[in-house]
Image (cartoon, helix red, strand yellow):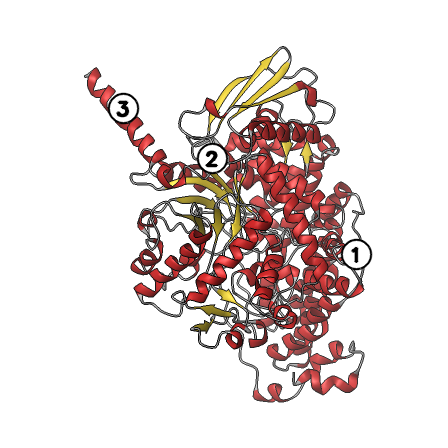
Amino acid sequence: MRGVWVGVILTFVWLDNARSFQFESTLDHVRTKTSADIQQAAVENLIKRTLPGRYSNFSVVIDPHISNNGKDVFKLEKVGGVIKITGTTGVAAASAFNHYLKYFCQCHISWEVSQLNLPDVLPEVNLTITFNDRFRYYQNVCTSSYSFAWWDWAQWEKHIDWIVLNSFNFVLAFTGQEAIWQRVYQKLNLTDADISEHFAGPAFLAWLRMGNLRGWGGPLSQAWHERSIQLQHNILDRMRSFGIITILPAFAGHVPRSFKNLFPNTNMTLMSKWNNFADVYCCPYFIDPTEDLFQTVGKMFLEEQISAFGTDNVYNCDSFNEMEPQSTDLEYLANVGKSIYSAMKQVDPNATWVMQGWLFVHSFFFWTPNRAKALLTSVPKGSMIVLDLQSEQFPQYDRLDQYYGQPFIWCMLHNFGGTLGMHGSSSIINKRVIETRNANGSTMIGTGLTMEGINQNYVMYDLMTEFAWRDEPVNLSQWFRNYSIRRYGKEDVNAEAAWEILRGTVYDFSGSERLRGHFAITRSPDLNIETWSWYKYTDLFEAWNSLLTAADNLKDSPGYLHDLVDVTRQVLQANGDIYYDKLIDTFNAKNTTDFQKAATIFREIFKDLESILATNEAFLIGKWIESAKKCANNTIEEKLYEYNARNQITLWGPFGEILDYAVKQWSGMVQDYLYPRWDSFIEFMNTSLAYEIPFNQKLTKTLIFLLYEEPFCFSNKVYPTEATGDTIEIARQIHKKYWYTNSSHALIDIKALPAKPKKTRSKSKKPCEACQQKPHLGLRRTVSKMKDLNNLHTYLIY
């Protein structure tokens, strides 16, 4: 019987090793080329930056030989009062340092705040951890625009430190590629005008790179190109010094419109229209993959890029991001894959292609299994790594049979557009990562974070990164409790109770609804917004109450103050949904008295939101706009970059093509963008009730666009970059106003609320034909704000 168990154990070991090594023939070369000495120095300098007064308490050794299976390993031990860190790579050693701070010193390093109160005598430790997979991936192609668009080297340096502290060794590096493309286009005889009309502005480069648009927000100046080249050198040098494998872009087939004139005999087609952008900003050409020009351009780009930046032999390429191929023919789809990879291999025989798997989610019905298989199997197994981009909600690895043998990385996407709003799927992450890794026939080779924007919901990212080394689920209640202690620097039963409620509510989503950070207060005014929630608002309010109760004990904690703003923001956001429903219901019932009561409270929510957000620098629009302006080389660039920054987080296009997709709940933006348009919309509704005339929503929304949404993009108003007001005092004032126990002040009786808000509402009646012909009385208040009433007719027929 003992022999049977030995056989079973050996079988499991063999299966694990077989899974670990099944791609070694093609991926073994995908490793850092940086010497151990350089990696050691990089980690030592990281420790000095993190703990300038305590760095001598740590020593670092880089030794690749402590691993016997090619996976990263780190060891921690206390020797003579010094914490000795040994890692297979600089990334492994940096993550060991963070692990010690986090789990032995109860410290916390996040995007927004750090808590580094180390004990005088460092705790004993004797620990070895082996990572589960070869790769820990970081970034989404959109993060470069939604979060990093305006970053300087100081911001990048801090973030790269965070990247390695959290063990990521496989990282996208997209900065500066437009400067490389400029050189290639010039060699292909494109004029400066041809190039300028093609390049998008700095806030929209992510979608230029994927062929979704062209020209919008541009052009790019030579100063921008030069700045980007230098920044990319700094980024790559630092990343590689830690042993990070950097992922550079490759040619995906998209080219400027002028290519058609320069190469009239080459077969190329216009890309499909993306999000209804007008022709002037959409649809670059896509070179047929069977054409020689495809190989020529792809080869030229990689040669130029490698000459400038070197290479780690890994390249990202996404030809069909949110756009479908021109043909469903399986041979055509296979040729696309072959051509993309061939262009890489001509320049780099060791090239590995990294592809975002978002196309299989977004265009689910186009990418049937046989079509996906044609693309995925067009290159040798192991020559392509697929990023299963939203594994926590819409995994594709089972539907597509483990990507037909291609290795994939299990990724948590979580965030779209960098929007704010507390949510997460902690229970799913706690189980699914491990289950997928251990499944029979799994081709999973790593974990990753693929959020579109950072600086939100850090708790989810802190949890997800741990499954790079954890091999069993955690006790989530205990984990969230410990998170609170680390983040705030001390125990507090009320704060811990708040996080336990948040864990079981906002951070326990398991549905199939698309979470995009869109709520009544952040949406452009409309009569037909559907509000919904997967948790009880009453539970959220109880978490808020518990967190605020901890104020006296945690008032000196930056993490606590940040989270108090965020949870108060979430409560006001939820109240916005509640009172939006009341607003619409009373309007449809033609109950003027109750409508005006709901309108008063709804408007007040915006004012309270503005006041609490202003108390913390993480929630200021001024930080975003001023960072954009600092990138400028002259006043013309400054105006262009400010427009880019404002447009991305509002209209997202000249006419609101992706309206409010990346909207932010930031101080300044609430006051001058979110509130004014709702204030005006409500006044139109009120006039409709008062005069008993139909509500012309189409015309009202057009006026709101012309008077509030579009002007915000062109405004040059300067906003604060430093916080104002006392977070705790303002949170208490808001709590006093909204909390149900203060009946004389309460605006909301949470005991009277339904468990969950309704998800649907009836559509409003179609306006009468007369109201489509001419403005009704509800226009008077807004029209009176126009500077030039002679242009009223133009505005109304726009």
Residue at the limit of the structure toward the left, as seen here: 1
Q: Nearer the viewer, residue 438 or 775?
A: 438
Q: Locate the C terminus and report the quarter of the image it occupies.
A: bottom right
Q: What amino acid is found at the position of numbered circle 1 in the picture?
A: Tyr
Q: Of residues 748 and 400, which is closer to you in this image?
A: 400
Q: Amino acid at mark 3?
A: Leu
Type of amino acid under label 2: Phe
- Against 199, residue 10 (above or below) is above
Residue 210 placement, left or right of 56: left
Closer to the chain start, of discs 1 and 3, is 3
The residues bearing labels 1 and 3 have C-alpha atoms spaced at a distance of: 64 Å
Query: Label 3 to label 2, Cα distance in Å?
Result: 25 Å
Q: Which mark is residue 467?
A: 2
Helix, strand or loop under label 2: helix
Residue 24 at x, y percent in the picture: 37, 37
Q: Is residue 563 visible?
A: no
The residue located at (64%, 62%) in the rendering is 648
Q: Quadrant of residue 162?
A: top right
Q: Dot 1 surroundings within 10 Å: few (below 14), some, or many (20 or more)?
A: some
Of labels 1 and 2, earlier in sequence is 2
Decide if residue 775 is on the left or right side of residue 294.
right
Residue drawn at point x = 72 percent, y = 61 percent: 641
Q: Residues within 10 Å of mark 2 (few under 14, many from 20)?
A: many
Residue nearer the viewer, 279 or 383: 383
Residue topped by disc 1: 719
